[in-house]
Amino acid sequence: MIRTAAAALLLASALASAAHAETVYLRSGQREGQGWIFAHATGCWVATAGHVVPEDRAGVIVIGAGGARGQGERIVRDPAHDLALIRIAGTLASACPASPLGDRDVRPMLDRVRHEGAPVAFERRAAQPGTTNVSYGVEDVPLQLLGISETAPTFTLRPERARGDEVYATDSGGPIRFRGSGIGEAGLPLGIVIQTERERSGAVDVVALRMDAVRAFFESAAAGTAREPERAAPFGIARFEGETRDTACGPLNLLAAAQPCGWRASRSAQPIELVLDLGPAAQTIGGAALRFAAGAVPKGVVVATSFELGGGTQWLGERYCALRPAAREVTCALGLRTVRGIRIVMDGRTVELLEVRVLGR
C-alpha cells in the first residue's frame, strides 16, 4: 500500500480560495446593483437581477476587485425569474475570475441551513469609506433563512436585526453565500438577490433566486454560442494523495492505454487528490473530464489550477463539480485558463478513476 503525505495545508488552501470574493458592482445609467461574475468557454459573464440592467447592453459597466472594469456586450434575459446574464468585454473580462456558477442543486444545502442554522450571508462589493471606490472590498450581511419556495426556484431571507444590517434595492443581483466548512463549501453561492421588500414591522425581507436555477438557464440559453472543438491536452502526474488499494491499479495507469484498471484509491484523514503537470510551458485549457469505475464513484470533484508548479504552489479558481445520480463521468468546465498545473480533489472515501482528459481550447 502506498501512503502519501498529509494534505492539511492543501485543504486549507482549497477552502480559502473558495471563499475568495467574486462579487461585482454594476452601473447602468441611473441604475446600480451587484452581480456574480464567472468564466465560461463562451466568455466572461455576470449574473444579476434583470431589473438592474436596461435593454442597452453597451450602457452596462461592471467593476470588480482592484478597479478592473468591463462593459456589457450581450444580455440574455429570463423575465419569468427577473434574471439577466451579461457577457462583458474589457479589462475585467481579460482576467475573468473563475467563480463557480452553481454546480449542484442547492436545495439540500438550504435544508441544512434551515435545520442546522448554518451561517449564510449577503455579500456586497463595498465602497471605501468617504469615497465612491467600489473596488475597495466586500462586506457581509448575516442572514436568517425564512423559507424555501415549493413552487418557484426561490428562497426568502431576513437580515439579522440584532446587527442592524440591511440589504437595499441597490444590492439586487448580489450573491447569497453559504459558509460551510466542507470541501469547497466556504463561500459557495446559494443564489442571487432578485427582490427586497420592507415589511410593516420595518424588517427587510430578501428574495433570492437559487444558483442552480441560474445555471440551468445559462446552459440552455446563454451558452448557445458556437464553441471551438475540445481537444485533449497531454499531462503528467506531479503528485497524488490517498492510499492506493491495489499496487497494480496505481495512478500511473492513468497515463497508459489498455490497462486492466484505473487508479483505485481510498482516504483516511486526507482527501483523495491528483495533481496534473501540463509541462514546462503553460497551456490554455477549458476544463477537465473524468471517468470512474462503477461502484467507486465520488460525489463530486473539486478542481483548481495554477500558473506555476513547485513549492508553495498557489491554487486558484476552485470549482466543485457534482456527479449526477448513477453517473460515472463528469466534465468540469473551467472557462479558458492559461495554466501549468491542475489539482483534482475527489469528494468520496473510495474511488477508482479510469480516465482523465484535460480539455484544451
Image (cartoon, rainbow, N blue to C red):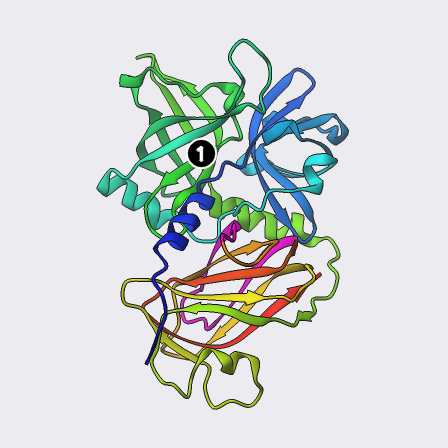
Q: Give the position of the N terminus as an image quadrant.
A: bottom left
Q: Position of residue 51 (x, y in %)?
A: 59, 26
Judging depth in this view, the residue of 105 and 305 nearest the camera is 305
On the image, numbered disc 1 is attached to which residue? 208
219 or 296: which is nearer to us? 296
Say if 225 sits above or below 239 in the image: above
In the orientation shown, which residue stands out farthest toward the left? 116
- Determine if the magenta segment contains residue 334: yes
**Residue at coordinates 58% horizontally, 21% vertically from top-left?**
134
Was residue 329 drawn as part of the magenta stretch in this picture?
A: yes
The part of the image, by quadrant, that contains residue 340 is bottom right
Q: Is residue 101 above or below residue 329?
A: above
Q: Residue 310 placed where, x, y %?
A: 54, 58
Residue 343, position as x, y percentages in the image: 50, 60
Q: Is residue 153 visible?
A: no
Q: Nearer the viewer, residue 123 or 315?
A: 315
> At 33% across and 15% down in the image, what residue appears?
164
Q: Quadrant of the C terminus?
A: bottom right
**Looking at the image, which residue is at 34% across and 12% down?**
202
The type of residue carrying mark 1 is: Ala
Which segment is the magenta one?
Answer: 312-336
Residue 121, image quadrant? top left
Q: Quadrant of residue 229?
A: bottom right
Q: Position of residue 39 (x, y in %)?
A: 62, 47
Q: Residue at x 68, y 59 (%)?
A: 282
Instruction: Determine whether, in the image, residue 175 is placed left or right of residue 233.
Output: left
Asked whether 40 or 58 is in front, the reply is 40
Secondary structure category for the residue under label 1 = strand
